[in-house]
Amino acid sequence: MLALIGDLTQTRTVPTMTDPPPDIALRVGALGVSFRGVRALQDVSFSIPAGGVSAVIGPNGAGKTTLLNCISGVVRHEGAVELEGRDLSRLRADRRAALGVARTFQTPLLVPDLTALDNVLLGAHPKMRGGLIGSMLRLPAMRSDETSMRARAAELLSRLGLARADVRPVGSLAHGDRRRVEVARALLAEPRLLLLDEPAAGLGADEASELLDDIEEFAAAIEMTCVLVEHDVGLVMRVSRHVVVLDAGRLLVAGPPAEIAADPQVVAAYLGDDWAEVET
Ligand SMILES: Nc1ncnc2c1ncn2[C@@H]1O[C@H](COP(=O)(O)OP(=O)(O)OP(=O)(O)O)[C@@H](O)[C@H]1O
């Protein structure tokens, strides 16, 4: 096991083989990324408790999306990423996906000409026995996997409030529905860790709230941990177990929502005095 810096109490921990299994899903330690000399993340360490929804917040350009990119392996990074005790730091994005990391993007990345169901099925291959190639070759074992995946994809669509048999191309659906399709696709492989980049962006307040409630329910049902980046702080504080605050590429503070909302540094850097007046 890795010795990582930073846990829920912000203290240095060095786990040993005799430690009981921790109630921690994700640890990142000393994470760093530079883009052509610009330091997007610097020495970021924190832990996320297992199960339910946690969130990453911070001002524009704080490094939130870059953090999700590091955890999912989309960008190369310094430092450590550990999922449920397994070191992912040197693994590529596809290996991390196979080990249970799924994510959505700020702008939904869907195939516009395919139906919602077919887009969701694109999320199946980390879970299928023969992988994407086996699926394309339609090997017998893959056909039965595919039938059950198709049924599950349809069920996820209806659970998220979409018509399972909608034959329209996904590109013609409303923005909120496209977001739901992307979430359903990420959920199909039953990830251990689901990373959502601004899942409620562009949705009305009720729609956003409903979507996050659905995600919370799924997280509980399949014992998955969800980490979302979200600008709607009211929503974040309502659904999150744990909140990580970034500012200018560094960790400002991490902790339970009530602590974060009352933290003077967070109020000064991000929430503003109006928030403090409204919430306290
Ligand atoms: N591919 C890239 N190439 C160069 N610079 C990048 C790249 N990706 C991110 N950055 C820079 O890294 C910093 C962090 O960006 P990031 O998108 O992670 O912030 P963010 O907190 O998600 O912002 P927002 O809330 O506006 O989405 C910014 O200065 C950004 O310009």
Image (cartoon, grey):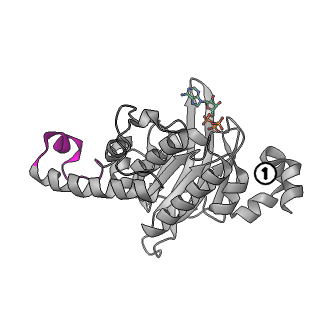
Q: Indicate whether 219 appears above or below 188.
A: below
Q: Indicate whether 62 appears above or below 195.
A: above
Residue 264 vs residue 161: left or right?
Answer: right
> Does the segment drawn in magenta span residue 132?
yes
Q: Which residues are magenta?
A: 125-139
Tell me the quarter of the picture where residue 240 sits.
bottom right
Tell me the quarter of the picture where residue 261 sits.
bottom right
What is the three-letter code of the residue carrying label 1?
Val
At 48% from the left and 48% from the top, the residue drawn is 180
User: Is residue 70 at least partly visible in the picture?
Assistant: no
Coordinates of residue 148 in the picture (x, y in percent): 24, 58
> Does the segment drawn in magenta span residue 228?
no
Closer-to-camera residue (151/277)? 151
User: Is residue 147 at least partly visible in the picture?
Assistant: yes
Q: Which secondary structure, mark 1?
A: helix
Quickly name the residue at label 1: 266
